[in-house]
Image: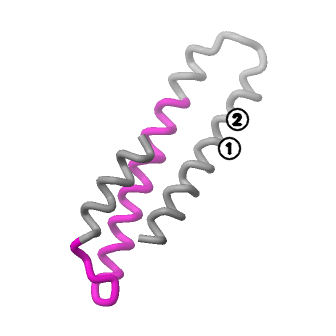
Amino acid sequence: MLEELYHNFKEQTARLDRQTDENVFQQLRGRYERQLQQQLSGEAKELMYAYKRNDILHLQHLLTESIAYYLSEFRTKAGST
């Protein structure tokens, strides 16, 4: 999911000149970042719904950390584009 989304982002931003189009670049990065967060959050909710154990708070914490990690990875990769 992360790699596919990043690939799409990179294709869209490849035609931009960051010197003159930085604002457009930042808008695209924000759009893709929100899309990634929505997808990951949706999957996390599905996992928590299917999880039928008492330690759901621990799972929620792990999923929240994982989402933050993937968003950070996307930001890092997108920033180096």
Q: Secondary structure at mark 1?
A: helix
User: From which residue to which does the magenta span run?
Assistant: 15-44
Q: Which residue is mark 1?
A: 65
Give the percent coordinates (x, y) of residue 50: 56, 14
- The residue depicted at 55 percent of the width and 56 percent of the height is 73
Q: Amino acid at mark 2?
A: Leu
Give the percent coordinates (x, y) of residue 10: 32, 62
- The residue depicted at 66 percent of the width and 10 percent of the height is 52
Q: Which residue is mark 2?
A: 62
Disc 1 versus disc 2: distance between alpha carbons? 5 Å
Please name whichever residue, 53 or 74, is drawn nearer the observer in this view of the structure: 74
- Location of residue 4 (image quadrant): top left
Q: Amino acid at mark 1?
A: Glu
- The residue depicted at 58 percent of the width and 44 percent of the height is 67
Query: In the image as oriented, which residue stretches furthest toward the left?
Result: 15
Q: Is residue 16 above or below residue 32?
A: below
Q: Quadrant of the C terminus?
A: bottom left
- The residue depicted at 28 percent of the width and 89 percent of the height is 20
Q: Is residue 9 shown in magenta?
A: no
